[in-house]
Amino acid sequence: MNIHAYERLWLVASMVLIVGFIVTITYGTVGLGITMVDDREETISPDDVDEDDRFQDPRVEQVGENEFEAYVVSMTFLFQPDPIEIPANNEVTFYVTSRDVIHSFTVVGTNTNTMVIPGEVSAMTVEFDEPGEYGVVCNEYCGPGHHDMEGSLIVHPEDEYSLTELSVDAPDQVGPGEDVELTISIQNGLLEDLETTVDVEVGDETLEQDVTVPGGETEQVSVTVDGDDLEPGDAEWSASVDDEVETGTVTIGDDADDGGDEP
Amino acid sequence: MTDLFVDEYPEQARLVRAAFLTSFVALGIGALFGVIQALHRTGVFRIVESTTYYTVLTGHGVFLVITFTIFFLVGLYQWAVTDSLQRGPVDARLTWSWYGLMSVGTLIAAIAILAGFLDDPPDVLGSELSADVLFTFYAPLQANPIFYAGLVLFVVGTWLAGADWFRTWWAWKRDHPGERIPLPTFMVLTTMIMWYISSIGVAVAILAFILPWSLGLIDSLNPTLTRTLFWYFGHPVVYFWLLPAYLLWYIVLPKLSGGRLFSDPLARVVFILFVLLSTPVGIHHQYLDPGISEGFKFIAMTNTMFLLLPSLLTAFTVVASMEHGARQRGGTGTLNWLRALPWKDPAFTGMALAGLVFAFGGFTGIVNAGMNINYLVHNSLWVPGHIHTQVGTAVALTFMAGSYWLVPQLTGNRLVGRQIALFQVVLWFVGIVFMTNSMYRAGLIGVPRRSAEPQYAFDYEVGVGSMTELDVQLALGGVLLFVSTVLFLAIILLTAFNTDSDPLVDGTIPPALSGPEDSPRVLDDLRVWIGIALVLVVIAYAIPLASIVDRGGLFGPDVGPFPVVVDGVMYLQHGVAYVGVLIT
Amino acid sequence: MDDSGISTEISHDEFDPIGTLALIALYFVVLTLMWLFTYFVEFVGNAPTPTVLL
Ligand code: HEM
Ligand SMILES: [Cu+2]
Ligand SMILES: [Cu+2]
């Protein structure tokens, strides 16, 4: 075949370009460790999402030192959980599935981006270095409300991050002069021990108590406020640990005093 | 000057005119929808409800990349085969029946789409008449069955068109034993081989799964499987849009430049490479899909990169042909010859600008093809940026420019308003620069595509410029493109009625500088290339498809349908119900 | 068209597409630079990216 010398030259240059592109991408995989979303996860029927250990309660969990997992469900037209809260400088693996149609899970302004296909679970391991609030959007058309499908991802500084859950057992009503006793359960979702302080307020009284909750466990703390220190009537109470707060009201004295607040 | 095409082949000219008419009607509607989207997305002006935006977007996609491009293709190819073999089809009834089938198919699909604008669409075949599923119709989003049926008819029509051209060629071969296939016909036949191999994918997806499922005959399907079959077809289809533009660049552009095609043999090699490599690459649209292993994605990536080769070779041959023309017109110097090109000719200028845009768009295509870098751009506005530089300009602007040269030969009428035509192609170029500049940059900061209101609670981090500036550019570019389309349609319409004028067109195509005699005959042995192409397809797809079916089952893990209804109430109920389940 | 304006016939052997070579060489350079920028600045700078942490 009769090919002009310049064209031969260009043919060689073209091959150099092509091989150069392939080499760059291979370097991304091998050198930078970038992995593609792939078939490493088992399939899951969209009907079984509610029975699945990971997805029936979409959440973030700590699974190892500096390792977290986030189980995320996409559906028309929202993400769960919302917001998703994770620590900075830790490996977080997102597992995302869909209940209905094809969506995406895309953290705007980052390369954390995957299609979400019903029947499949997308898995991505990332580490966010910069704390802040990121937008999460669906960038695959999923129906008339597609543009409303938005979530958020909050990346907390590592030392401010907790997976603490609080629940409080408090009376609705006590007799005049009786003590008010609050039982506070603190669940520590992190693997490390949680050393913290429980702050309790009932009416104008404030109390503090130090507590250590071992990793992955729940501790109960009881706090008693002397009934004589409280005014009759409705008293607001609150219990807080770090950023978690629970509040309620307790009625002191006869319920005839004030508006009926019986449950 | 030889006889005009319309005088030599009046029957064929009629068919080409009919095909162009359908194509240009679709272009008009598509452009109207395009400008509606450009203004809506950016919040400049919202004439439809945001839920109806997706009806508009479905129409834009289907009318432009199915109707406009493919009807132009069949018209152009009918011209190319007739003109280069110097004979009509064996049986004109077949020719008109494929045109009829394609038209009926388009009409049915269009009715299903446009019904989305009704407040209360009628029920047809047991479900509401609508098709707000975009041109990719990813299951489990579901359209009315007639939408899929229309698409099938359309595709069968194109298959018959290919059969018609093959038949014409066989008849010609009997009369011309031992002759090389004329280059335009060679391009037509190779394009159609690629199309046959690739459109099987979408045919299987629709006929075996989506259509029966939309009719309620089967109640579940495997979304990864139908999606993979779609993209098996979805990448080659972009070459189905592009190759007619290549035909014009190889056959007509050198002539318009005042020169001759630089190399006929390389043109053949290029088209053969497209036959071989267009199909085993479709998985590059699924880099971010779960359920497909990284190995398959890597193979698709390397194949795709090699698919760059024919386009890079084309760049050389086409530019060299232009340079040849310029030098014959007295051009000198290393680059000064560029000035000697016929820049006042809208047909030339349109194609040259289209080629320039294509060279840039080629770069963005490399980025899309780059596997891991796909995390950056996947489904962001970058992708419509790429779409509009490639099919939306390299192809569309070449078609418009080519029409300025062809339509006079098809009608016997002189082109009306050559100056305005020149303005029109330049206006398109300016419009596309604004619109895609905005789309590419917005895509890089994460603005999603396919969204009626890409304005969220968070702010995008715009590095250079501002969101307002990006929005203004997109809206402005869209308006310029729309105006340019209207001008084009007006010029063509006036030309069609500009009877009793002289066309002033010379339809002869000069022979290539290096002719087919410089290339081995095996290039024309189409069976060899079909064989190799099929082997490559099997290598690239057999294992991925087997693995997808093995994972999710042929009919999927119980994935029910989600008909897209305009008001979205159903979705809301759906969502609320699940939230309810979770709370309790 | 009417302004084909061909003044000299240039045959295959006389034609030296040096201008094309220059343009295509420029294209080569532009492609390489844009690729490196897009990959290493835009993409790698858009962290975090899904990885196997090494
Ligand atoms: C008047 C000129 C045009 C304007 C103003 C325009 C505008 C737009 C806009 C704004 C989008 C993005 C919509 C979104 O993602 O939300 C879009 C998408 C698209 N356009 Fe155009 N466009 C024009 C012409 C064309 C042409 C000529 C073609 C092809 C021949 C084309 C093919 C497409 C395709 C395939 C999409 C993607 C559709 C999808 O995501 O489903 N457009 N267009
Ligand atoms: Cu969506
Ligand atoms: Cu592709």
Image (tube, rainbow, N blue to C red):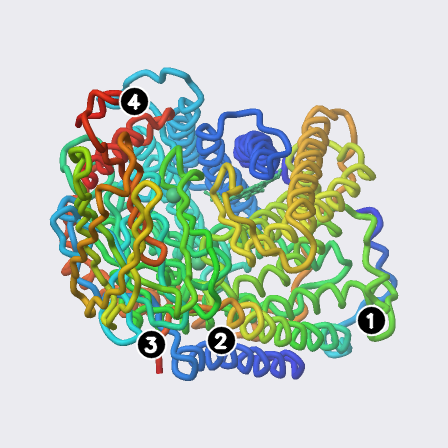
* Chain containing mark 4: B
Asked if the residue at tag 4 contacts the one at tag 1, i.e. Cβ–Cβ closer than 8 Å, the answer is no
Indicate if the residue with disc 1 has its beta carbon within 8 Å of ligand 1. no
Whole-percent x and y of residue A163?
Answer: 28, 60
Whole-percent x and y of residue B235?
Answer: 42, 56
Residue placed under numbered mark 2 in the picture: B520
Which structural element holds mark 1?
loop
Q: Amino acid at mark 3?
A: Val
Q: Residue at x 51, y 59 (%)?
A: A109
**Location of ligand 2 given as a quarter of the image:** top left
Residue placed under numbered mark 3 in the picture: C52
How far apart, in angstroms, are the residues tagged by discs 2 and 1? 34 Å
Q: Amino acid at mark 4?
A: Glu
Query: Disc 4 vs disc 2: which is toward the camera?
Result: 4
Q: Quadrant of the N terminus of chain A?
A: bottom right
Asked if the residue at tag 2 contacts the one at tag 4, i.e. Cβ–Cβ closer than 8 Å, the answer is no
The answer to whether residue B9 is above or below residue A7 is: above
Q: Amino acid at mark 2?
A: Pro
Q: Earlier in the sequence, mark 1 or mark 4?
A: 4
Residue placed under numbered mark 4 in the picture: B128
How far apart, in angstroms, are the residues tagged by discs 4 and 2? 57 Å
Q: Quadrant of the C terminus of chain A?
A: top left
Mark number displayed over residue B335 = 1
* Chain containing mark 1: B
Crowdedness near tag 4: few (<14), some (14–19) or many (≥20) residues, C-alpha within 10 Å: many
Q: Nearer the viewer, residue A196 or B433?
A: A196
Whole-percent x and y of residue B185?
Answer: 51, 54
Q: Earlier in the sequence, mark 4 or mark 2?
A: 4
How far apart, in angstroms, are the residues tagged by discs 1 and 4? 60 Å
Q: Amino acid at mark 1?
A: Leu
How far apart, in angstroms, are the residues tagged by discs 1 and 3? 49 Å
Q: Is residue A248 left or right of residue B57?
A: left
